[in-house]
Amino acid sequence: MARNVVVLASGRTELLSLPHLVSHLQGTTVKVRIPPNNRSLIKVAESLIKSVWYEDIDNQPEKIILLVDVDGKSPAQVVDPLQHRLSTRLPDEIKMRVRYEYAQWHLEAWYFADATNLREYLGRNLGHVDTSKPDEIENPKLHLKNLLPQVYTARVSAEIARKASPPTIMGRSPSFKGFVDAVTNGTDHREACER
């Protein structure tokens, strides 16, 4: 049976890029949804989750993954309060189907995990970043913007994602591995990190 997963993410970059980063997953349909009018995902998470859950009552998602940027903070500082708040507001039938995952800084850190393909896309070296630890790159979005010969847009992000190797990224980025595990019913990344 195919899995039906909805990922709630913060913006257009994720909307266009995430489908490429999970396209290698067999038997899983992943839809990405973002808040309307550039609103904050954290502020509208409750209404967005309910909207996704109730929009097609005959084809509800197996699970909803809330993917947030933690902007260099510890995941617990951002994810735990959000999870606690929503656990008191969502009906039981929904809350047991919601997973909380994160990108350590931004989705762009995941691109640095696949240094070979990113270097090929850019046509230049990646500067002074440790691509073996992409989740530790401070402000990877700004670093990527500085490397690009053109303006960084959601479409550019999607082009980079299309050329990326998700298995390579999984091997180097714990936050990306946690996200993929959540999509595929693998290990709960945050629990594994806390052990």
Image (cartoon, rainbow, N blue to C red):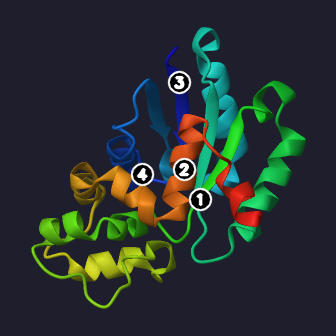
| CB within 8 Å, label 2 to label 1 | yes
Where is residue 6? Give x, y as percent: 54, 33
**Image spot of residue 87 (x, y percent):** 85, 44
The amino acid pointed to by label 1 is Tyr
Residue located at (43% from left, 66% from top): 172
In x, y percent, where is residue 24?
A: 34, 38
Residue farthest to the right? 88
Q: Residues within 10 Å of mark 3 (few under 14, many from 20)?
A: some
Residue linked to disc 3: 4
Q: CA distance from mark 4 to mark 3?
A: 18 Å
- The residue that label 1 is drawn on is 102
- The quarter of the picture where residue 170 lies is bottom left
On screen, residue 8 above or below 165: above
In primary-sequence order, the first of circles 3 and 1 is 3
Give the labeled residue for mark 2. Answer: 179
For residue 83, side relative to residue 64 (left or right): right
Residue type at mark 3 is: Asn
Label 2 or label 4, whichever comes before in sequence order: 4
Question: Mark 4 against mark 1, which lies toward the viewer?
Answer: 1
| Mark 4 and mark 1: Cα distance apart in space | 12 Å
Q: Residues within 10 Å of mark 2 (few under 14, many from 20)?
A: many
Q: Earlier in the sequence, mark 2 or mark 1?
A: 1
Residue at which label 4 appears: 14
Q: Position of residue 5 (x, y in %)?
A: 54, 30
Name the residue rendered at 37%, 41% in the picture.
19
Distance from disc 2 to disc 4, alpha carbons, whole Å, reads 13 Å
